[in-house]
Image: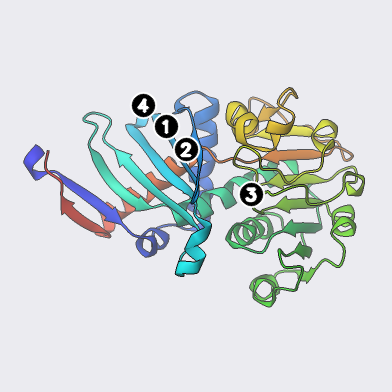
Amino acid sequence: MPNNARLLLIDSVQGESLMNYRDVLDATREAFVLHQQEEGRVFPLLRERLPEGVWGIKSGNVAGQNLLGFKSAGFWPGNREKGGEPHQATIVLVDPDTGRPLCIIDGNGVTTMRTGAAGGLGLIQLARADSARLCVFGTGVQARIQLRYALELLPSLHQVDYVSASGEPDPAFERQFSERCSIAMAADRNAAVALADIVITATPGRGPLFNLDAVRPGTHFNCVGADTLGKRELPEGLLQQARLFVDDHIQARQIGEMQWAPELPCHQLGELLSGQLQAHRKPEDITVFDMTGIALQDLTVARLIYERALARGVGSSVAWPW
């Protein structure tokens, strides 16, 4: 048996062909619930700055489902000069009975999709049901997937303002969403925040993106960019005014927006998704979902890809004897 062991390799194109919007949403929801009910574990995070960028490992398991694995991921800005993607992620699923790797999956597409799905779940639970106007900071891969899920899940949204890194319009970004909503670059970022029912921040997290006095009662914030020690996107004082929700208590206080106010109380989104807590949102509440991404999200989506790959004969199977 050990001499006949195989390892399945799934590249980015193959992995993306095995995912769809709705199934990733369901798998991500499952990850939040497993985490909340302590059926799934999130192991201590490794996140380190290197001379070349940032590198980390997120890992976990679901013992009752024989699910074990990790994601190696980080950001290498120098890849742009080489014609490559700065974000790099690789997911490894491991046989919990033997410790042997079962599958290696290109993790970039998984990270993008599961983060978008997590943001969508946050909007369903926390944004006002009548939300009509959204402001998004960023026009990159993550801003696009966050906006896609928002427009899919909240039919009331019809107006989108965006703030680009360059300060210039992004025609390609606008074309992607123009059939679903009215979309335009914000002339003034603070004015756009003041008009928004929902604000999504999906930037490198180099500092506050708008002024505190621009925030109006009733606004919901999905915060994506703060995922490393020292990063932030929200202005000083906003967390103190908001009802705070996170994907993981510990991780959010280590590397998320909550690193700037770790003493504040917060709830995990899994409390809402599992039915342990009701949001009871008041129209004037300011809410924040601090998204740092947990390993179980990667693992439940990776398992979906792995099972479909086996069933459909997708991927490259290579000998991996003991």
Q: Are marks 1 and 2 in contact (CB under 8 Å)?
A: yes
Q: Tell me where residue 196 sits by quadrant.
A: bottom right
- Give x and y (percent) for residue 103: 28, 47
- Give x and y (percent) for residue 235: 81, 43
Q: CA distance from mark 4 to mark 3?
A: 27 Å
Q: Residues within 10 Å of mark 2 (few under 14, many from 20)?
A: many
Three-letter residue code for mark 1: Gly
| Secondary element type, mark 3 | helix
Q: Which disc, if any, is residue 63?
A: 4
Three-letter residue code for mark 3: Gly
- Give x and y (percent) for residue 19: 44, 57
Q: Is residue 156 visible?
A: no
| Secondary element type, mark 1 | strand
Q: Which disc, if any, is residue 28?
A: none
* Pointer 3 residue: 120
User: Marks 4 and 1: which is nearer the front?
Assistant: 1
Q: CA distance from mark 1 to mark 2?
A: 6 Å
Q: Residues within 10 Å of mark 4 (few under 14, many from 20)?
A: few
Three-letter residue code for mark 2: Ala
195 lies left or right of 289: right
Tell which circle, 1 or 3, labels the residue nearer the N-terminal end: 1
Tell which circle, 4 or 3, labels the residue nearer the N-terminal end: 4
Q: Are marks 2 and 3 in contact (CB under 8 Å)?
A: no
Tell which circle, 1 or 2, labels the residue nearer the N-terminal end: 1
78 lies left or right of 274: left
* Pointer 1 residue: 60
Q: How is the model colour-coded?
A: rainbow
* Pointer 2 residue: 295
